Amino acid sequence: MVVDRDGYRDSYDGKVDLIDSIYYATVTLTTTGYGDITPVTSAARLVNAFIVTPLRIAFLVVLVGTTLEVLANEGRQIMRDTRWRKRMKDHTIVVGYGTKGRSAVHTLLSNGVKRDSIVVIDPRAQAIGDAGNDQMAAFHGDATNRTVLRRAEVVSAREVIVTTDRDDSAVLVTLAVRQLNPNAHIVVAVREEDNVPLLRQSGADAVVTSSEAVGRLLGLSAVSPNLGEVMEDLLTYGEGLEVAERPVLGREVGKPPSALPDRVVSVVRDGKVHRYYDSNVSVLAAGDKVIVVRPAKATPWAERPGADENED
């Protein structure tokens, strides 16, 4: 308009300057059009008809389209959340979908946990997108916020796995989860060993020190490369060997741990872990669980013939 200012007329003083051009462009783009500045020449009117008017329409299309898209996405999210809450119970919440969170989810899936019973909470949009691509429910937000935890139905969750990047955040999340759900089993990953007692006082049932675990594995690999390789194999699911926990089958009751087909490492009785050589668990009893080392591709205990038997 500045270039073709002579083709326009200002009803105030009859002249169009730079400020008038900026003003006219603004009211034109917003489709306000007070009529105080009008095109009077044929060239100016053609510019308005074939350039300015399509720009106005494009602006309205973008504005309305963006608004409708936001409203539609919000509506779909609300509907998904409503349907999800109606059926979700005794689920597992994973706070943080980074390297540790993904590994935890992979381990859960490898041990028979259903994908639709896992919920992810993460403040990063990219992580939420990745969890969605992995076909899991995901909530974007900070898990230290109780509102976010309630959206994930933490009150009815069976287990919560906390894998935040900072230990102070892990403490806050643990405190919030324990307050909202006193019965949930909480597993927390921390970086520093000094923070383990604080996490346990905050309500964590199990605390894993990631830096210490990595350090031990590095030390074992340095002292004995073969031992380090075996330990890494045990921690990797899907191939080689794996460590797993399973119930004692009915036909195994009354037998010593050494008689089981799997290599028994420990026996869990009344919530307490006993080493396989402990005289208190020299004979397996009904209700016991065993922690075993087995081939990673072994048939899960629940799928074996007679796995649901309670007696011989």
Image: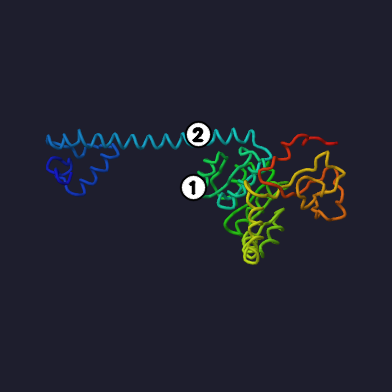
Q: Is residue 168 left or right of residue 1?
A: right
Asked if residue 83 shows in the view, the reply is yes
> Which kind of residue does numbered mark 1 sit on?
Gln
> Which kind of residue does numbered mark 2 sit on?
Gly
Disc 1 crowd, CA 10 A, few/some/many (<14, 14-19, 20+): few
The alpha-carbon separation of the residues under discs 2 and 1 comes to 21 Å
Whether residue 15 is situated above or below residue 198 in the rendered picture: above
Q: Is residue 64 left or right of residue 135?
A: left
Q: Nearer the viewer, residue 124 or 220?
A: 220
Q: Secondary structure at mark 1?
A: helix
Disc 2 crowd, CA 10 A, few/some/many (<14, 14-19, 20+): few
Mark 1, residue position: 126
The residue positioned 55% from the left and 51% from the top of the image is: 98
Q: Quadrant of the N terminus?
A: top left
Residue 130 position within the rendered picture, expressed as x and y whole percent measured from the top left: 51, 44
Q: Is residue 19 left or right of residue 43?
A: right
Q: Nearer the viewer, residue 221 or 159?
A: 221
Mark 2, residue position: 75
Whether residue 239 is situated above or below residue 311 in the rendered picture: below
Residue 297, quarter of picture? top right
Residue 35, quarter of picture? top left
How many numbered circles are shown?
Answer: 2
Q: Nearer the viewer, residue 293 or 37?
A: 293
Residue 50 position within the rendered picture, expressed as x and y whole percent measured from the top left: 20, 34
